[in-house]
Image: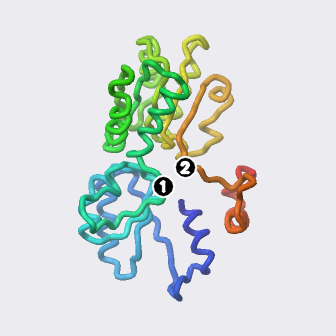
Amino acid sequence: MKIGLLTALSEFDSEPLGYRLEIVEKNHRGNANRSFSHFKQFEKDDDALFVLGGVHSPPYIQHREYINQSRIPLLIPWAAGGPITRYPSDNNWVFRLSIDDSIAGQRIGEYAIGQLQCKKPHLFLEDTQWGKSNYKTISEYLDGKVTYGISWFGWNTKQNTANIEIRNAVVGGSDCIILVSNYTESKHFLKAMALLPKADRVPIVSHWGLTGGDAEELMTKQIKENVTLSFIQSCFGFSGAWQTPFSLDVHARVKKMFPDAIGKKTK
């Protein structure tokens, strides 16, 4: 997200309309109280222009009313909790340029039932407002179509717990897993599936939350060879015949500005 913003600013040499822009980095570590303190700092800074949101939805869901009533422009490139942008007022200061969970949840359910022909999916959901937002949309689609199980898990779920939970779901007759998890916990659930005997493994359909980290570390050889994984993602990339001159220029600038961060992974 930082690379994307800096690349966008480079179109204007970081000086749109003659104003010099500087990114001030903050890390709320997924903690809603720390996130709230950052918004308070924004309000006290006369030079602050907008807040670029991060990965985690819960802080923005919890403080949505404060953000809008305080008229703080919040740009959300990742956090996808449905309630974030659905403030019940025209005075909405939160902006998102992609699908959110109100749409993603239904599409995940459609894929599990329609494409994978799942008859008894099992939902693994992060026990946060983000997970509950996804539960609402996924369950609304699944209700009346199939029977399904539900497991709630917290942050920092360890490998042993993931092994037990995945095994229990499969033993219980689930024929696919619907996963709503961030990167760290997703690694454990994918590995847990890979560790099962081949005859017991079932497909995993995931939210894009699992992509919020190092893809090479997530998709190990063990997981690539032993796990059938699908995940929803906005349809955009820097490869393919449909590229426009603008997108090609953006990609070229990204590689030039951040060779160490992009490098071979863009090829």
Which residue in the structure is indicated by mark 2?
Answer: 234
List x then y, in percent, for residue 160. Answer: 46, 23
Mark 2 element type: loop
In primary-sequence order, the first of circles 2 and 1 is: 1
Which residue corresponds to the image point at 51% horizontal and 40% vertical from the top-left? 210
Q: Which residue is drawn at 43% across and 23% down?
A: 121
Crowd around label 2: few <14 · some 14–19 · many ≥20 (10 Å) = few
Find residue 144 and report its horizontal and vertical position in percent.
33, 24
Distance between the alpha carbons at the discs numbered 2 and 1: 7 Å
Residue 36: horizontal and vertical position, in percent? 29, 60
* Residue shown at 24% from the left, 59% from the top: 88
Q: Describe the colour scheme in one phrase.
A: rainbow
Q: Is residue 3 left or right of residue 113?
A: right
How many other residues sit within 10 Å of disc 1, few (<14), some (14-19) or many (≥20)? few
Q: Residue 46 carries which label?
A: none
Q: Which amino acid does label 2 sit on?
A: Ser
Tell me whether the residue at label 2 lies in contact with that at label 1, contact meaning CB atoms closer than 8 angstroms: yes
Q: Determine which quarter of the picture holds residue 133.
A: top left
Residue at (48, 55) in percent of width and height: 98
Quadrant for residue 138, please give it. Answer: top left
**Residue 204 position (above or below residue 241):** above
The residue lying toward the viewer, choosing from 168 and 102, is 102
Front-lying residue, 127 or 99 = 99
Query: Residue 164 location, x and y as percent?
Result: 43, 18
Q: Which secondary structure, mark 1?
A: loop
Residue at image mark 1: 98
What is the three-letter code of the residue carrying label 1? Ser
Identify the image quadrant of residue 39.
Answer: bottom left
Up the image or down, 152 lies above or below 257; here it is above
Q: Would residue 63 be found to the left or right of residue 234 on screen?
A: left
Residue 62 vertical placement versus 124 (above, below): below
